[in-house]
Image: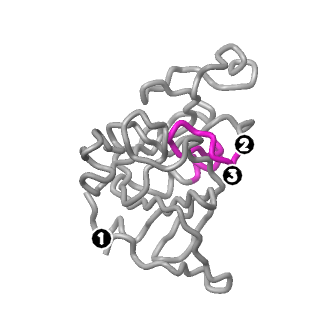
Amino acid sequence: MINNENLLTQLVINIAQQTLTLYKQQKVVAQYTVSTAKNGIGSQQDSGCTPLGKHVIAEKIGLSAPSNAVFIGRVATGEIYDEAFGALYPERDWILSRILWLSGIEEGFNKGSNSEGSCDTYQRYIYIHGTPDSEPMGVPLSHGCIRMRNQDIIELFAQVDEGTPVSIINDVYDIDDVSGIAHITNIYE
């Protein structure tokens, strides 16, 4: 699932900073403010938490969908989200515009199961996805997924492939402001 082509592009989701950073050849290309889980960090089934660790983009969904397209069960419904439509269904956890479905690659940590039960990111349906632009970013409010602004997920979607490595961390790290080089190494070496 991981190949050398995909290693040229990497994503780092930083829960502590509520950011998603896109790297190409270990240089920062873009950084987005995101929203991770309101319930915090965790990998167990039904926890409502965002999992840590090494992942890959398993599936890209929504290539030709318009901005604010509504998805249910990873299928576009044909609806387009706006505030009036959102008011009709206030209980929905809106998944909009694009979906990057993540799969963990660390057995017993974010893949498969462990002594506490299932901890599989893919089977938990953890995505990077668009959310209503009225939803706050930079604040953990999701049900486990990584929420982004619609324009941001559309932009990111075009720059990544299935198999692209994604590391979810809860740490503060520095990016050299002059060179744009991250003080992290290849996250899959």
Within 10 angstroms of label 3, few (less than 14), some, or many (20 or more) residues? some
What's the coloring here? one colour
**Bounds of the magenta span?**
136-155
Q: Could you classify mark 2 by the number of other residues whose Cα lies within 10 Å: few (under 14), some (14-19), or many (20 or more)?
A: some
Closer-to-camera residue (73/93): 93
- Judging from the image, what secondary structure is the residue with disc 3 in? loop
Q: Is residue 12 magenta?
A: no
Q: CA distance from mark 2 to mark 3?
A: 7 Å
Of 51 and 74, the residue lying toward us: 51
Give the answer, above or below, for where 174 lies relative to 57: below
Q: Are marks 2 and 3 in contact (CB under 8 Å)?
A: yes
**Residue with the mark numbered 3:** 138
> Residue 136 got which mark?
2
> Can you name the residue that lies furthest to the top here?
88
Q: Is residue 168 above or below residue 116?
A: below
Residue 4's disc is: 1
Q: Which of marks 1 and 2 precedes in the sequence? A: 1
Q: Mark 2 belongs to which amino acid? A: Pro
